[in-house]
Each structure stands twice: as C-alpha cells, then as structure tokens.
Amino acid sequence: MTICQFFLQGRCRFGDRCWNEHPRSGGAGGGRQQQPSGSNRRGWNTTSQRYSSVIQPSSFSKSTPWGGSRDQEKPSFGSFDSGASASRNRGFGLSQNPFASPSSDEDKDEKKLLEGIVKDMEVWESSGQWMFSVYSPVKKTPNISGFTDISPEELRLEYHNFLTSNNLQSYLNSIQQLINQWRSRVNELKSLNTSTKIALLSDVKDGVNQAAPTFGFGSRQAVTFGSPGFPVNNSSSDSAQNFSFKAGSGFATAASGSTSVFGNPPAFGAAPSASSAITTSTPAFGFGKPEITSAASFSFKSPAASGFGSPGFSGFPASMAAGPVGAPVAPAFGSSSSVAGFGSPGSHSHTAFSKSSSDTFGMSSISTSLPVSNGSTTTDNVLFTPKDQLTAEELEQFQSKKFTLGKIPLKPPPVELLNI
Amino acid sequence: MSLFGTTSGFGTSGTSMFGSTTTDNHNPMKDIEVTSSPDDSIGCLSFSPPTLPGNFLIAGSWANDVRCWEVQDSGQTIPKAQQMHTGPVLDVCWSDDGSKVFTASCDKTAKMWDLNSNQAIQIAQHDAPVKTIHWIKAPNYSCVMTGSWDKTLKFWDTRSSNPMMVLQLPERCYCADVIYPMAVVATAERGLIVYQLENQPSEFRRIESPLKHQHRCVAIFKDKQNKPTGFALGSIEGRVAIHYINPPNPAKDNFTFKCHRSNGTNTSAPQDIYAVNGIAFHPVHGTLATVGSDGRFSFWDKDARTKLKTSEQLDQPISACCFNHNGNIFAYASSYDWSKGHEFYNPQKKNYIFLRNAAEELKPRNKK
C-alpha cells in the first residue's frame, strides 16, 4: 500500500478509514503531536475518553461519526485520528464493534478483508463466472461457508442422468435452488450486516467444518434436494449438539449469529473468538427480532421447506419430554433438508433452536410456558411473550440495560419492551 | 429464462454467428480440423509418447466414446479406431511404450485399450465417476493412477482387479498431473496435494491453495534439468497460479496471473471472467498454453512472466488441449464445457478438434 502523505504530515482527514497506509510508528505519532499543540492534545484525550464512555456498544449508529463516513463533519477530529495514539483507536474500535479484538491493526486487517470480500462478490456476480465454487477471501485462509463446490462436469453428468430418467424438471428445480442459495449468500456477503461479519471473521479464523455437499441429485425419485442436501452432515450435527448442550458455548454461537437479539451483551464480547467453527452463515435465534435476516421468518411458512421442516419439528415435543435432547435433535436436523436446521446458507429457520435450547440450558427456570407451536404458525406466541407470562426476574432482566449472566431469560421478550 | 443471467455470448464479439451469413467463427485461427470429430463435447485430449513413431491423437468425449487418429506430418488426420464406455469419458492417457491407452469414464470404471488388438478391458473400479487417469512408470513399478469423485486416489496394476494402493483425498478429485517422481492432485474445496512417487506413491505435502476459487486444471512443469519442479493450477475464475515446490524465495517465485477475461483495459464495464479449462506445457520450450471457456487459447512464458500470444475467439469454449511429444503440434478442442449450464447446450452444434503448428509461437521470450 502507498504511504499516506497527509498522515505523514499529521493531517489525514480519513484517519482509520484512509485507504493508504498509515505507518504505525508510535514514537512518530506522539512526537508529531507535540509540535502543533501539546495542551490541545491533552484536551482531546480527555474529551475522547468521555466520548468513549458515552458510546454504548449496543448503539452502532452512534459510533459512525467516528469512523463511518469518509466526509467527516469535524475535520479536526480527522487530523487527530491520523496522529492518534493506539489506545484511543482501541477505544473506538471497541465502540464500533464490541466483538473485535482490541487491537487497531487487527481491525484494519479485518476491514480490509471484509472490503475485499465485498469486492470479490461484486465481481463474481457481474462477471458471469461459474457460480458453484467455493471461495476464500485471502489465499491462505480456509473457505467461507455457504458456498458449495460443484464442477461443471458433475453438473453436466447430473443433467444427463436426469435426462435419461426423464426427470428433467427435478434437475431444473435443484439447479434453481442452488442458484438461489448462491445468490442469497452472495447478497449476504455484499451487504455485510454485523451478524454476517462476525460469522465471516470466525470462519476465517477458525476454519469451516464444511463437508462435501453430497449431491441431493443422487436420489432420482426425490423431489428436490433430498436428505444429503448441503453442508448438513456430521459436523453440523456436532454443532447442533454444541448448541443444545454446552450452555456457554451454545450462547456463544448464538450470539455470534444474532447480536441484536440479546441487545448489548458485553458478556458475550469474547464469544465469537471462542466459538467453535460455525458451519453455516447465521443460524439466528427466533427470539424477539423478527427482522434478523431477509429470509422468511419461519421455516414453517416457507413452502419448500415446510415439507422438511415439519418432520423435524414434530419430533420435538416427544423428544423434549424424553429428556436429553441431544441425540434426537441432531439427526432431526441432520436428516432434514437444507432449509430446516443448519445447513442452509440462504434461509434461516429460527424456531428449531428456540425449542432445543430451552430444554437443555441448565440455567434459569426452564419455562414450560415456552410455546411449542408445532406447525401452527401463530407467530406472536413464539416470537414474543406477553408480559404477564414473564416472571418478575425475567421482566427485570429485559428491562435492564444489559443481561446478567446466569439470569438471562429463556423466553423471548415481550413486544412492549422492544425498541425496534 | 436465463439461469446464468446475461452473458457476453460467443459470437457476439465482432463477427456474429447468427447475424452474418458469411463469416463462421468456428475456426478463426484457420487451424487444421481433425476429421470425424466426436459428436459430443470433448473432455480430454492426449498425444502419443515419443516411443511411438508418428503422432497419434486420442480424444475422449461426452458421447461415451474414445477415438484415435493418426496425425501425419502433412497435417492430414486419419481416424483409426474407437472404443466405447457406458458413460462419458473424462480422461485419457497413454502408457509409456505407446501400446496402450487408458480411459477414465463416468461409468466409474477405467479401461485399458490395447491398440494392437483393439481390445479394451476394465482395469479399475471406483464408487463414483473417475475424473483423472495417469500412467506412472517408476524404475521399480508401473501402474495406473486414477482419481475419482469418490475422494480416493487408486493405483492399479493392470493385471489385478484390486488396487495396489488406495489413498484418501480430502475431497473429490478434480484434476491431476503426473511427471515422475511427482504427482499433483487438485480437489474440490480448494484442496491441493503433492505426492512423491519414488518407491511407492505417498503424500508429500498438502499445499494451501494459491487461488481463491474452484480448481479446474493442473499441469506440472520441469526445470532446466528436466526434473519436475512445480505446477500450474487453473481455476474457474480466469486465473492461473504458478507454484514451485521448493523455491528459494516463495513469495517472489510463486505468482498468479489473470487470463481468459474480457475487457482487458476497459475498466468501466464489469469484466467477464471465464474458467481455465486446460493447461499444457510445451515439452521443449517450457512455455505453457492455457485454454478457456471464453473460446480462446493463450501462450505464456512463465519465466519471463509474459504473454506470448492470444488467439481469436472461437464461437465455443475450448474444453481441452494438448501438445504432442516434440512440441510441434498443439491440439485444442472446441466444444461446450457446460460453463453456462444446460441452457447453452446445443446437441446439434458440431464439436471440433484443431491442430496448430506450435514450433514457432511457443518459443520463450528473450533468453536471460
């Protein structure tokens, strides 16, 4: 990267956002600051500390003036960004993204990575290149989840097989499904909301347990993608167990997918780095926030999935009654199609998790009032709990600014308390 | 409806196939056309080894057949023989003495075709289509190496129905190349493994892929002492990576280059990116040829890091390529490679194999 000339002069307007390189020589930075106005710097330091305490991790919008837009209303801040000490940046790094590790250099790398991914996705879409390919943002990193590798020959062979069995329509359907999944995944990566970012970063760091996308084509008579489906396999059922059993890590992986759900959980600040590899993009919880992702809120509703969704779900009440949910849960997910459960890059089924977690989290009161709507789609019951159904403690938790670990309610919050 | 969106199709650049009546873009390079070419897409090409006098070309196609032509010095091609599989043929190779041809097919088998007797017998069995087949001639053993989508690499003594050895791959085998004592296998999910074949085949190293997308083709190159020293890896993203196994300076010696893309200089319109379908190294000069889905072939000098030549665009993708044993003939096959899905598949379209004189064009740039 080219060295930023303005930064060297101490007057780079973009600061952290700058596309050129700001050589991080702490001594130079400090030294440079001495020259213009020493007292000014002290003044800035105090104000910055005050600001960083005000900006809560939850409200992302507030942090944008610091680093969001390149055209900053206060150019004087910009000049300080350039010469700012690392600690100041660290403060802001945290305020912008509570899950980032506290080093500004890493922040920069991550941003570069994410920008690179966005660019690559745009090129991929516009260039007309082969879409059924895995992808990794930087050459040495593992593949990003949500993409499957299918070679043109494999696809062609499937076409011929279906042709001979006169089943071309199912081939076309499968292709369409594959394409839709690819497209939704690419759009997800292009738009990069916080949950995908976090999932991506953990992908890149920990590696993705993606097993082979065994072709759903195999079953000639089957409708679309029968059981083998997509990366639903052993590793994903493992993560299913992670979700169900280990309370701590279960929450961790959940948090990485749905930060907005639990509001501002600084308790989970360290979660993503600790989480085991997440095979899918964002297995968001169904608690509360209905607008987490673009796909239909429930797999019950989505037509293609419902066929698959229900067998898995109908198994639930029985298995929950039976006690340990682990084993029955995992195969229910493992065998159901890509839509219900984990393996779906595109769609997200929420309720599945809400059911499994409630049984095995040994945490606070297991609320039997958790509605198990087994196919009936009264979404209000499952998404929010009416206020009267909450215990006093749960209500208090919802009303407080942050959750306290150990007292996190298992039910979704009531509608009234949500400020969307 | 178009599943793959808009495409800068073949035949829209310059001379359009559909509109104009006179120009036909199937052979813009005016190369020699091989007679009685296969009826469906050609997946693989292979020339006979130097032990056989003359030049014989083998091509496997998606019409389940393997055809053999004799290529005479005049350029005339004479169809010699043909064998059938029960599934499309994905790879072919010759034995070192030029008497046998090995063919790998989607019917999960590989066959050995004795050209003298014109008999073919099955020598290998997999659980999934066999994607690659290579003949290994070592001082103490000889065998056939088959790579399959069932994630295994099997080594066969042609006399026995059980494999001599089975090696597990991390994923489905997509492409492979062998130059004794080195073998390279590229798999799905960007897997890349190098094997050493001395004594018996064993895994030498797993390499982090230098490319970001799906691997498509691989070819080993040799150094000045005629020893295999590295490989070229092509992906679906119009990019080829040159990778040395033990370079003095990996960061500088290994590199990637973009190829088979449209709109070279025009940066405003989004570039069209095509897959690299095949890579072949010139046996004498060490320069390489790449063929892509865009219907072009290019010659490159990897040491000078320059492009030597790019062809005109054919109206179909070029799906395979091959040099003959002395590097005088460059063969490339023009047929649909499924890069745009089933919609652009036209069973009526003729498939071609072209032969080009490669003695001059592949000379390396300034000798350093």
Image (cartoon, coloured by chain):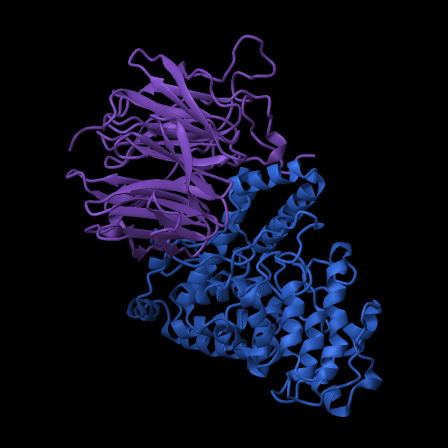
Chain letter, purple in picture: B
- Name the foreground residue: B286 vs A378: B286
Residue nearest the observer in this picture, B137 or B311: B137
Q: In which quarter of the image is residue B110?
A: top left
| Total numbered badges shown on the rendered structure | 0
Q: In this view, does B37 lie to the left or right of A362?
A: left
Residue A221 location, x and y as percent? 70, 48
Q: Is residue B325 left or right of residue A91?
A: left
Q: Quadrant of residue A110?
A: bottom left
Q: If the image is split into quadrants, where does the C terminus of chain A sit?
A: bottom right
Name the spot of residue B1 as percent of width and height, x first.
70, 34
Query: Chain A appears what colour?
Result: blue
Can the viewer see residue B90 in this picture? Answer: yes
Q: Can residue A54 be seen in this view?
A: no
Q: In this view, does A268 lie above or below A60?
A: below
Which of the two residues, B359 or B363, is positioned nearer the viewer here? B359
Q: Residue at x 24, y 31 (%)?
A: B283
| Vertical order, A363 against B78 (above or below) | below
x 66%, y 75%: residue = A328
The picture places residue B359, in percent across and down from the top left corner, at 25, 21
The quarter holding residue A350 reads: bottom right
Please determine whether, in this image, residue B256 is positioned above or below residue A345: above
In percent of width and height, residue B282 lies at 27, 30
Is B215 left or right of A328, judged from the image as shown?
A: left
